Image (tube, grey):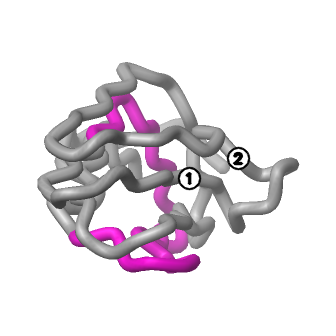
């Protein structure tokens, strides 16, 4: 991929409800590179929820965030650095519906 000509700091996805089971939270666009700088998960539910996040799937080899358990009312913040190329996907897996995911970073095209 050629060097970026445009970089826009933006919310890449969310705030969005993380559904129980495995789901795609974000799919990139061809000819774009996305640099994830922040992942925030909020659990406003009355019970604990376990969440994990991966690029291109949620098998152990693809995880960027291994399973973490968030107690009721808890928040998780990761100031990270991950790159998604083109149409790669950001996928989630949760033990229950109700947590909220927000991912921010650079959209480079």
Per the rendering, the mark at residue 63 is 2
Q: Is residue 6 visible?
A: no
Front position in the image: 79 or 108: 79
The answer to whether 71 appears left or right of 9 in the picture is: right
Q: Residue furthest front?
A: 47
Residue 70 falls in which quadrant of the image?
top left
Per the rendering, the mark at residue 53 is 1
Reply above or below: 9 against 45.
above
Dots 1, 2 in contact, CB < 8 A: yes
Asked if residue 21 is among those painted magenta in the image, a careful observer would answer yes
The answer to whether 67 appears left or right of 23 in the picture is: right
User: Pointer 1: residues within 10 angstroms few (<14), some, or many (20+)?
Assistant: many
The answer to whether 25 appears left or right of 95 in the picture is: left
Residue name at image x 56 percent, y 51 percent: 52
Residue 8, x across and y down, in percent: 22, 42
Q: Is residue 83 visible?
A: yes
Residue 66, x across and y down, in percent: 65, 40
Residue 87 falls in which quadrant of the image?
bottom right
């Amino acid at each position: 991929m050629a060097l970026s000509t445009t970089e826009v700091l933006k919310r890449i996805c969310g705030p969005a409800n993380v559904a129980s089971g495995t789901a795609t939270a974000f799919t990139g666009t061809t000819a774009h590179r996305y640099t994830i700088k922040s992942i925030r998960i909020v659990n406003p539910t009355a019970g604990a929820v376990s969440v994990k996040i991966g690029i291109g799937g949620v098998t152990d080899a693809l995880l960027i965030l291994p399973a973490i358990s968030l107690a009721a009312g808890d928040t998780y913040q990761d100031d990270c650095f991950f790159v998604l190329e083109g149409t790669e996907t950001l996928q989630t897996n949760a033990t229950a519906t109700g947590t909220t995911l927000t991912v921010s970073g650079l959209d480079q095209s």
